[in-house]
Image: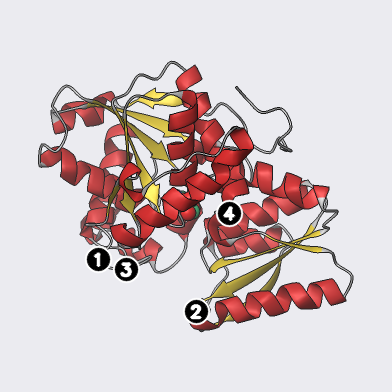
């Protein structure tokens, strides 16, 4: 099944474990829950971008690139994993970071520095594409042989990482009825959708949108899955109707922590000892908990939640402060 000719590096610790969530399942009194630990992919604190980078950096090396250039938010997990992949492969890394510059280098940004990435910044997100193009051009003119890693690693090459993740999860004997995960730049979902078709997963994939309306994301994911399919065999034409996205939990906007994320992070931590992240998995798990409480899933359903990583942001503002509940801080003083 595996097309042998696709260049791929070994950057991740695979397969990542699948664990049952018995206490959380009992607490909710409904479906049986499992978690796929892609927060444990192993490269500089892990996360889902590492699977994509195995294919993207292989492509960069085939093109004789020596510098990885990519862009994201100040707390981008994608940028941190790209910086780590560059270090691991003896390449340089330039990150174009957008948004209000934080007062301190904490969380992912601290790790970007430790991993030796050069940082180019603009406060204006609308200026990002221009600055990214300019950065690539300058690096090329300086003889640095840049390779542009797309936002979130989400192009057809990067999406292959999750097509093979689907093969991996099926080989682990997982027979769940549903798989749920955070979806944003779409590469994870596109890969899973493609892998579902190619490797034969009979259940349903549900992406919980972090920041995009379902209408835009479903067609984007379908196009990405279609474009990635040619690497695995004859091209498959996916349609937006093949892609399921729930966008009811992203109204607060990207990276805005609300009670939804706060509650999900607290429940996973206190019932299972699992740390979610404030931007992606906290929101996706919050959506999943809400859907379970609304009886969206049959009560005997088996659901696998993909933990896609992101925990370094727990230690960065504004998330760190927003997660400290005054009541708990007080109790720990008293106790
Ligand atoms: C990037 C990211 C996602 C979303 O993955 P996409 O492929 O961009 O849709 C989910 N969770 C975490 C922790 C991420 O960093």
Badge 3 element: loop
From this view, report whether residue 165 is shown above or below residue 113: above
- Asked if the residues shown at circle 1 and circle 3 are in contact, with their CB atoms under 8 angstroms apart, the answer is yes
Question: Which residue extends farthest left?
Answer: 294
* Residue that carries the numbered disc 2 in the rendered image: 125
Q: For label 4, count other residues whose C-alpha is less than 10 Å away and answer few (under 14), some (14-19) or many (20+).
A: many
Query: Residue sitting at 87 percent across and 75 percent down?
Result: 142
Specify the label residue 253 is tagged with: 3
Of the 4 image quadrants, the one containing the N terminus is top right
Spatial separation of the CA atoms under disc 1 and disc 4: 24 Å
For the question of whether residue 127 can be seen, the reply is yes
Specify the label residue 153 is tagged with: 4
From this view, report whether residue 309 is shown above or below residue 113: above
* Residue that carries the numbered disc 1 in the rendered image: 251
Spatial separation of the CA atoms under disc 1 and disc 3: 5 Å
Query: Residue sitting at 71 percent across and 64 percent down?
Result: 117
From this view, report whether residue 233 is shown above or below residue 171: below
Identify the mark nearer the N-term, 1 or 4: 4
Give 331 or 65, whichever is nearer the viewer.
65
For the question of whether residue 311 can be seen, the reply is no
Identify the mark nearer the N-term, 2 or 1: 2
Identify the mark nearer the N-term, 3 or 2: 2
């Amino acid at each position: 099944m595996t097309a042998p000719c696709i260049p791929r590096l070994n950057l991740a610790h695979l397969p990542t474990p699948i664990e049952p969530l018995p206490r959380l399942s009992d607490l909710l009194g409904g479906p049986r829950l499992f978690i796929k630990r892609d927060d444990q992919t192993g490269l500089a604190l892990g996360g889902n971008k590492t699977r994509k980078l195995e294919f993207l950096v292989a492509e960069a090396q085939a093109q004789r690139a020596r510098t990885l250039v990519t862009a994201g938010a100040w707390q981008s997990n994608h940028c941190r994993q790209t910086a780590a992949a560059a270090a691991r492969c003896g390449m340089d890394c330039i990150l174009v970071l957008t948004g209000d510059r934080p007062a301190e280098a904490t969380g992912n940004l601290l790790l970007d520095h430790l991993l030796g990435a050069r940082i180019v910044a603009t406060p204006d997100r609308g200026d990002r594409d221009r600055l990214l193009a300019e950065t690539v051009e300058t690096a090329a003119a300086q003889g640095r042989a840049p390779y542009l890693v797309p936002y979130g690693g989400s192009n057809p090459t990067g999406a292959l990482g999750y097509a093979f993740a689907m093969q991996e999860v099926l080989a682990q004997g997982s027979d769940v009825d549903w798989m749920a995960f955070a979806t944003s730049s779409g590469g994870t979902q596109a890969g899973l959708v493609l892998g579902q078709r190619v490797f034969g997963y009979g259940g349903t994939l549900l992406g919980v949108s972090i920041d995009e309306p379902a209408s835009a994301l479903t067609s984007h994911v379908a196009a990405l899955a279609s474009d990635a399919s040619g690497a695995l065999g004859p091209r498959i034409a996916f349609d937006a109707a093949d892609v399921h996205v729930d966008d009811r939990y992203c109204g607060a906007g990207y990276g805005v922590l609300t009670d939804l994320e706060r509650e999900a992070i607290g429940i996973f931590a206190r019932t299972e000892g699992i740390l979610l992240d404030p931007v992606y998995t906290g929101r996706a798990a919050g959506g999943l908990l809400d859907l379970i409480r609304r009886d969206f899933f049959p009560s005997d359903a088996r659901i696998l939640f993909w933990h896609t990583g992101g925990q370094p942001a727990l230690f960065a503002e504004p998330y760190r402060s927003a997660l400290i509940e005054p009541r708990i801080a007080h109790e720990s003083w008293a106790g």
